[in-house]
Image (cartoon, rainbow, N blue to C red):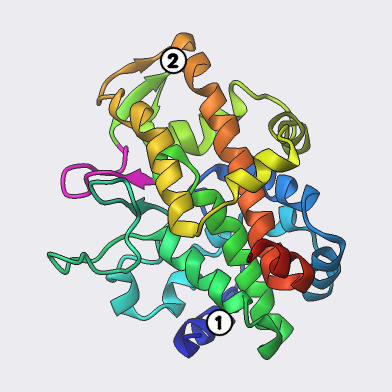
Amino acid sequence: MTTKFLKAAALLFTAAVISAPSFGWGRMGHATVAKIAENHLTETTQKRIDKIMHGTALVAIASYCDDYRKQLDATFPLEWTGGTGHAHTFEVDENNRPYNTLKHPETGRHLTNAVYFADHCMQDLAHASDFPDSVQWKEVAMLTHLMGDMHCPGHVRYAAMHENIGKYEVTFSGEQTTYHKVWDYFMVVTPLPFSFSDIAEICDNCSQEEIDEICKGDIYDWGQNVANLCQECRFSVKEGDKLNSKWILKHTELTKIELRNAGYRLAHALNMAFDPKYARKHSR
C-alpha cells in the first residue's frame, strides 16, 4: 500500500479545530449513512472500530472531512489534488464509470475523484494491522465521509469540461439556492424532516439478500451504479429552474436509495477490513 497516502492520512486533523461549511450530504446525511453502516457491522468489526475510535461512534466523525477540510487538503501532495484539495466529487467516463486515476487517460488533466480516495482508504485498511491506531482512525474517518460523498447525486460529474458541478442557481421550494445545495442539504431535511436515526430507520429497509446484491463488485462498480441512478435528475435540471413539491416527491426515493446504499457499502468495506471471517465469506 502506498506509504505516501498513509503518511498524508496520519497528518489529518492535527491542526487547530476550525468550523467549516458542509460539502456533500451535510451533517444530517453523513450521520444517516454512518448510522446505517453501524447497524450492519459485525460484532468483530464493531469491537475493532471501538478500539480504534476509543468508543466514538461513526456518526460523530462522519463530517470530519468537511470540518477539517483545509487541514486535510494541506496533507496531500499537490500532484494528487491538482492544487484544489482532495475531492468530494467524482467524474465518470462515457459509460458512467469512475476513473481509477487522478489524471484523465487521454488529456492528462487533473480529475476530481472521491472514489479514488475512498478506494485508497479501503486498500490501506486492508493492511490496517500494520499501522498504529491513529492512522487507522483517520482512514476510518475519511472512508466514512467519502463513501457518503460519492453517493450524493450532486457529486457526480458527467461532463466536467462543460459544467460546474451543479453550482448554478435554482429555486427550491420557493427558496433561492444552488443545485449542489439541493442535494447536499435540502433533499435530506425537506422531505425527511426527522433525526438522522429516524431517517436511517426509514432508509434501512432491505433484506440481507438485497444488501449482498447492493454490495457486489468493487468501489468503481458502486460509483458507476450511483452515476446511472442519478443521471436523470442531474440532466433534468437547468440553471434558473424552479424545483417544486412535485420534483421533490419524484426524487425523494433516490435520496433514500443513495443514503441506504452508502451505509450498506460502508459497512461492507469496514467488515471486509476488520472481520476476517466476513472477508473470507465475501471474497468467494
Residue at screen point 54% across, 23% down: 252
What percent of the width, then of the height, locates residue 246? 46, 9
Q: Is residue 220 above or below residue 255?
A: below
Residue that appears at 23% across and 46% down: 94
Disc 1 designates what residue? Answer: 11
Asked if the magenta segment contains residue 243, the reply would be no
Instruction: Quadrant for residue 15, please give it.
Output: bottom right
Q: CA distance from mark 1 to mark 2?
A: 43 Å
Does any portion of residue 182 appear in the rendered image?
yes
**Magenta-tinted stretch:** 156-167
Camera-nearest residue between 279 and 128: 279
Question: Against 188, is 219 above or below?
Answer: below
Q: Please state the horizontal and vertical placement of residue 97, each as a whole percent of the image.
A: 34, 51
Q: Which residue type carries mark 2?
A: Trp
Which quadrant does the C terminus fall into? bottom right
Q: Earlier in the sequence, mark 1 or mark 2?
A: 1
Q: Are marks 1 and 2 in contact (CB under 8 Å)?
A: no
Magenta highlight: main SS: loop
